[in-house]
Image (spheres, rainbow, N blue to C red):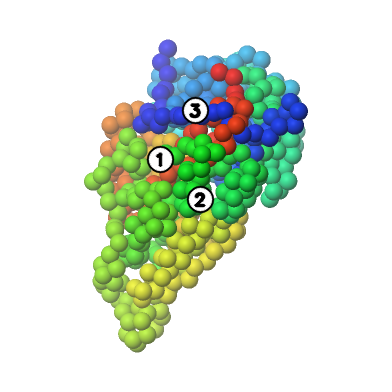
Amino acid sequence: MKSFLLTTSAIVALSFGPAHMAMAQDMTEVVVGTDVDAGTLDPRLARDTTASRTTDLIYAGLVHITPSLEAVPDLAESWESPDPQTVIFKLRPDLKFSDGSPLTAEDVVYTYTTLIDPDLSAPSRALYTPITAIEAVDAQTVKFSLSAPYAPLLSYLDMGIVSKALVEGGADLATNPVGAGPMKLAAWNRGSEIDLEANENYWQGAPQVDKLTLKIIGDNSARAQAFEAGDLDVIQSPLSPQDIERLEADERFGNFITAGLGVTYLNFNVSDPLLSDVKMRQAFAMLVDQDTIVNDIYQGVDEVAHSLILPSSWAYSADISQPTYDVEGATALFNEMGWSDSDGDGFLDKDGEDLSITLATHSEDPNRVQSVEYLQAIFEMAGVKATAQISDWPSFSTNYVQKGQHQIALLGWLNIVDPDRLLFAQLTTGGPTNWGGYSNAEVDELLQAGRSTLDQAERAENYQAAASILAEELPYYIISAQGYQMFYAKDLPVEVEATPRGNLRGLIGLTD
């Protein structure tokens, strides 16, 4: 038997415990603070971290991704690859959804068939497009056929399996999810909290924790204060640097602080007339003072980045570098494009119009707000009329960036378990999360090749070649490789297994 293996640099999982919990008689509860509410509890449509982390508890996938980024059996007890374009999964016997209904191969087929259907508009669809067919061989066996070998496949098959019967019967999984994971939804008070309770029908048995509550507290510092006051048992990134330093020194709390699987970046909308010129994007990139943002605003909890490939990745190359902070160089590029201070008012102009740009981010993260305001000051110092646009996360993400209405937006990507996860859907022509409208046929070809070979050295070459082009053409400017931090009180009834992905299964005490 031959199986696909997820290849990545190992990140060591740390186990901590026992730690704080809320208890009512025999009821154990863990309360987790999070920054934004979930947009949906249908795993196929999840777009935000809270949705992803909550659906990871409510649903189960064919595999589970461990803290060291290894794909291990979950609903599937085993799999084999008889050839590079075929993977066959054997499901565990007698699987059930949380409502007691059976989970079979037909549900797996339905989940992935709808996931790759353009009509569903799944944000992660591009991760699954190499799948050409999904077949239920029998009630416990599922066959995946691929258009080409697909190296990162297993790392994406933790997608939660949904019930075909429920969805086709009209159930709205977005608000009333029914999955086969270790927890199930008890209540959802929009904008306030999501209450989960143990699912006794999980194949591994009910977890040790009876209830897990996610409390939505948008402000990072307010969330940290609620944790210190004992109102929360666990908090994790995003956190403000000053809070991280204070909490790390507090002996009441355990912590897990490591390199993360995310980036903070500027998304340049190359469809915008001003930003369609690569020289303009390069000039603006030269006005990004990474060192001050990373080491002063974020106080060193992140790492200055040089390209789209994470330093922890097997594909990383120190030889790839995007433009660095150089105000004089930026000014020279602006002048080269015909922008100058012709009227002496301190702002660059051309053909009677001032050079102006809008920098945007969301209000829930004060460090991102401060970073945008700092960039605004630098841009204006360089003669650019810069406007800072700050709005709440739903307005910023759904109604603004995802509709391509931004010019330069500061945001982040998480869960980068493979270079493909950051690059393909975001930066190939017409990709579902290519919100800036970038298109380059050579990059398309390299990124397709990167996911279509099983040879890691060849994959690295393709990603490095693509990253070199992207570092010059700059649809993205990567400010930092994010750090990840989790803090927890030391008296939880379970050992805490933290993961740089930020998922929460390591807080509920699953049976080994």
Q: Quadrant of residue 490?
A: top right
Q: Position of residue 467 (x, y in %)?
A: 32, 46
Tell me the tag on residue 15.
Answer: 3
Is 393 situated left or right of 98 in this image? Answer: left
Q: Is residue 472 above or below residue 462?
A: below
- Tell us which disc is closer to us: 1 or 3: 3
In front of the other: 111 or 135? 111
Is 338 situated left or right of 244 in this image? Answer: left
Residue positioned 36% across, 74% down in the render: 381
- State the quadrant of the C terminus: top right
Residue 421 appears in the rendering: no
Q: Distance from label 3 to label 2 (Cα)?
A: 23 Å
- Please report contact status of discs 1 and 3: CB closer than 8 Å, yes or no: no
- Name the amino acid type tagged 1: Ala
User: Mark 2 = which residue?
Assistant: 243
Tell me the tag on residue 259.
Answer: 1
- State the quadrant of the N terminus: top left
Tell me the tag on residue 139.
Answer: none
Q: Position of residue 235 (x, y in %)?
A: 56, 42
